[in-house]
Image (cartoon, rainbow, N blue to C red):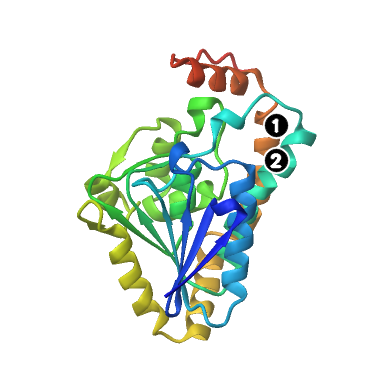
Amino acid sequence: MTEQRSGEDIVLAEDHGAVRVLTLNRPEKRNAIDLALRVVLAEMLESAMADDTVRAIVLTGSGGTFCSGGDISTMRRQSPEETRPRAEAAQRVIRAIWEGPTPVVAAVEGFAYGAGAALALACDRVVAATDASFSTAFTGVGLAGDMGITVSLPARTGPAAARQLLLLPRPVQGPEALTLGLADVLTEPGAALDRALADAERIAEGPPLALSALRAMLGVGAGGDPRAALDHEVEHQVRLFDSADFAEGVAAFRERRRPEFKGC
């Protein structure tokens, strides 16, 4: 087992044989995704995908939480020109997962909200603790969603259920997450990483070229090219970041009150 460090330790990498474990490491922020984290995570995913010795990847979070979503403390109303690099950096993470040859397993403890849910659902397999909690959460701050959630969520739950989860975000706990398809297997609390690692080790024993081909074919066969959805999400995100509703959503979150969205 070898350990690597990167990006001021905001993402940790640890190799277990042919499996690389990437850990979001902002426990004081419940691993919320700011710009620095998304850049470092994309770089580390791309590096793992390009490494022939890495046969499977596990994504997890430190401090008992997978990822609480985008870091709202770093968000403000801003122009499309300012938002586009931020939005595209988020999509770069998902492109790395979807376009790379290596299977990715998510180990989810605690919260997987907003961008955190999207990150988990972009993976090939989701291992979740029974007390894990998923939520789309984007509309709570006046956003529609990115990081591939408009593709990954309906692919897992079906379009009707996905529509309801996006329109009416709510916490979905482990057992219901399994029933809906948000998770593929449940574990006892605290055991998700061990199970994900065991599953990844089994995957790593498989034929890399065949697994890569399967991932490519399943992606194309899931109702069109999922990468095109990433471009669409960027366009919506850059528009919504410059909306009064987004500014109100962020302000309400910080002030711990219900937002009053105006549709502008």
In this rendering, is residue 142 above or below 172? above
| Quarter of the picture holding the C terminus | top right
Q: Are marks 2 and 1 in contact (CB under 8 Å)?
A: yes
For label 1, the SS is helix
For label 2, the SS is helix
Q: Residue furthest left?
A: 188
Q: Position of residue 71 (x, y in %)?
A: 54, 35
| Quarter of the picture holding the N terminus | bottom left
What kind of residue is marked 2?
Answer: Glu
Decide if residue 163 is in sight here: no
In this rendering, is residue 171 above or below 258? below
Q: Which residue is mark 1?
A: 239
Q: Position of residue 253 (x, y in %)?
A: 49, 21
**Count of residue discs:** 2
Q: Position of residue 94 (x, y in %)?
A: 58, 56
Q: Image point 65% across, 18% down: which residue?
A: 244
Within-10-Å neighbours for mark 2: few <14, some 14–19, many 20+? some
Relative depth, front residue between 126 and 14: 14
The answer to whether residue 40 is left or right of residue 172 is right
Within-10-Å neighbours for mark 1: few <14, some 14–19, many 20+? some
Relative depth, front residue between 242 and 75: 75
Q: Image point 67% across, 43% down: which residue?
A: 87
**CA distance separating discs 2 and 1:** 6 Å
**Residue 235 circle label:** 2
In this rendering, is residue 80 above or below 195? above
Decide if residue 164 is in sight here: yes
What kind of residue is marked 1?
Answer: Arg
**Residue 92 circle label:** none
Q: Position of residue 185 (x, y in %)?
A: 27, 60
In this rendering, is residue 233 above or below 77? below
